[in-house]
Amino acid sequence: MQLTQANTADLGFSKGLSEAEASLRLQEEGYNELKSAKPRSWLAMLATVLSEPMLLFLLACSIIYFLLADPNEAFILLGSAVLVIGITFFQERKSERALEALRDLSSPRALVIREGIRKRVAGREVVRGDLIAVSEGDRIAADAVLRWSTTLEVDESILTGESLPINKMAEDALPDEGTSTRNNASYIYSGTLVIKGQAITEVIATGQATQMGLIGVSLSSVEISSTQTQIEIKRLVRILGIAGACLSIGAALLFIVLRGGVLQGILTGLSLGMAMLPEEFPVVLTVFLALGAWRMSRKHVLTRRVATLETLGQATVLCVDKTGTLTENRMVVRELRTSTATLRIDHGGAVELPESLQPLVSAAVLASPENPFDPMELAIHSFGARCIYSKDTADWLLAKTYPLSPSLLAVTNVWLSPEATEHFVAAKGAIEAIARLCHIDGQELEQLHQVASSMAEEGLRVLGVARSTMEKGPLPQSPDAFSFEFLGLLGLYDPPREVVPDAIKICYEAGLRLVMITGDYPGTAVAIAKQIGLRDPSAVLTGSEVAALDPKELASRIEGITVFARVLPEQKLAIVEALKANGEVVAMTGDGVNDAPALKAAHIGIAMGQRGTDVAREASSLVLLDDNFTSIVTAIRNGRKIFDNLQKALSYIFAVHVPTAGMSLLPLVFGMPMALYPVHIIFLEMIIDPACSIAFEAEPEEKNVMNRPPRGREEKMLSWKRIDLSLVQGIVSVLICFGVFAFALHLGRDIKEARALTFATLVFNNIGLILTNRSWTTSLVGSFKKRNNALMGVMVFALTILGLVLYVPGLQRLFDFAVLHPDDITYCFIGGTVSIAWFELFKYVKRRRRPQIG
């Protein structure tokens, strides 16, 4: 029966709301859309950026220099501050859009019945009490109760994660107030998709009150926590900032007391403060992660929150959504069974169908619509097209369809051949329905159920198929009137992605625990878990069991569980929170609306880009653009590489602060002229240091990066051991540089010449620290076997800039340098090399005691 304007009245739904009633309710209850968070203005974001103490200090230094010293140097300082502010501001502008995506998805157009007239309206204008007509292919605009339906099937996978469509049937009464409507066969939900059939529904909830809206509320309430490295860097910056400020004030006072020059005392204090101030730490972190995100995008992984990249290497648990992530989110025919034959079907290619199975396949195709929309019927047609057997039904005409009904869960099609003298009848459906049509009972029915159960345990959706014939003439009112012959069983399933088993094996080698979370039944979930190679696939916990546990009990029970089945959205979120409570670093994959809160709550949310919903993509940290599960392995590999290289870069920057700070303080302590002005320090720290971080970012990964367990959650980016070794590197460097400065003055060299010698030694030392910190195990010579074009570019850049400031007259005057001769440059190069020799010896001894891959 086609739902038309004419027959709508026959069903008793001639009126619906009036336009006035609909308009009044729209005013009272608001539009049928999700409220989105008010975006921050650019002024608010700028205020957040400028609240960083180190940026305020840098700006303060620039202003003081404008007032007390050379404006040219002040402009250089100000330019450096603007650079840092600009980069940070750019990152702040990447705000969340998850609720906006939810609003767009949940507001399709709707066919409403108002005052007896069917009309299309925007989904946002639907109100509670509206009658809506839905049919195959429609996106449902609001939560509603069925008032009339025929063979209605709805895809609710974006809400429940269940891959198969749900049969829906009309019910006369609304639920009592407070009754949950989820999983009720008489209700349809906003954002879901009609796969088959037609219905007239009455809207019972719109906007925030819908199931989609409840997910939106849950999503907006989830806090995104800072990563451990972000917290650690902030703490380190705060400590060094306080220490730098104290030393800066102390140095200024000491200069004024010992030498009496207030202006020079202030400039000396500023120089030391800037040398101590770790203003490049967040810059390097931002640039490093941004470049890492760019490299990930070239491997089909989009990074939405770059700060999570360094957390990837720390992930201990990967929670995987089955439908569309581990599986292809499409149905295929997997198995055929008759009383005499069984055939397992592999993916792709033509199928040579045995003669005994040809009637089963032919009848299954004929029992499906000619242009199907249902995933299982699409799979049956696709399989029929692949089979090699005699097909002589192309010119047959469909005479009648007996649709699925609550009393008989089977579809029967009656076909007529132009040459034939009788009708051909094909039926498919639930085992009980087909057995009833074929009059199968007793022991034969019990055996049939046993076979179907064994197929279901393998994760298959089982359908029975039957056929019959009837002489031409009037057709009966019910398919029960035909004399059916039972043909056999079809087993269909949502197949795993081919690349998944190998990817899972690599994840296990990398020390990750894998957990499947799905809305499907336990049997289906366990079958898929076995096929893809999950460990302990029989360790199952259902959604109802999760709901019955409080957070502490769930955290205790969750240990050792591999499969979570029949899970609802809020339960996915509870599972993620329980894993986090157990100290796990959680990565969560998903593609549906139902995954969004858990994706946002996880330390690392990974969404599917092609099959995933906008909501899932916007709630995630990473998006797999190719929907390839192996891209998760690539992301974890790159995350570990990013952490390793970021650790090296930060160690280097920590070490290089010591000689700049030392050369600002030691001349004052020993009564010598100032060796470095702020312009020298800002040059070293704001130009060379960030450039050097690019060189570290481009370092190739360690050979054992995916053959070691995740780093411990308490493992810090800069451990005390690493800080100690970095300090020793810096102390040796400052002793060499101070020795060059003191020796030059001892020989009677001009202060400008001594300053130039010291600065050149610092630059060579800077390059030496980069080279030796490329690996803390491999020798400097061995490191050159690993190609790094960015490193070569940095070295050329640094040496070019050094040449310019030493030999271009205008820059010489700005930096207060004198011209250096070739032998002077040679001595500076030797000084820079000697400063790292001890660390190369340390690495050699370490390799001899314990060989490692560097």
Image: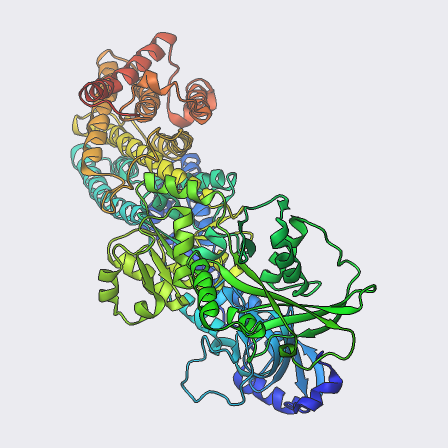
Please state the horizontal and vertical placement of residue 24, each as a whole percent of the image. Answer: 59, 89
Extreme residue in the top direction: 823
Please state the horizontal and vertical placement of residue 292, each as a whole percent of the image. Answer: 44, 39
- Side of 260 where 91 appears, left or right: right
Q: Is residue 499 above or below residue 594?
A: above
Q: In the picture, residue 697 is in which quadrant?
A: top left
Front residue of 786/269: it is 786
Q: Is residue 266 visible?
A: no
Which image quadrant: the N terminus? Answer: bottom right
- Side of 603 where 10 appears, left or right: right
Which image quadrant: the C terminus? Answer: top left
Please state the horizontal and vertical placement of residue 404, each as a whole percent of the image. Answer: 60, 75
Q: How are the residues colored?
A: rainbow
Please state the horizontal and vertical placement of residue 720, each as a whole percent of the image. Answer: 18, 37
Residue at the image position 55 percent from the left and 65 percent from the top: 464
- Side of 282 where 421 appears, left or right: right
Q: In the picture, residue 851 is in which quadrant?
A: top left
Front residue of 326/644: it is 326
Residue at the image position 45 percent from the left and 38 percent from the top: 291
Q: In the picture, residue 27 is in which quadrant?
A: bottom right
Residue at the image position 18 percent from the left and 26 percent from the top: 671
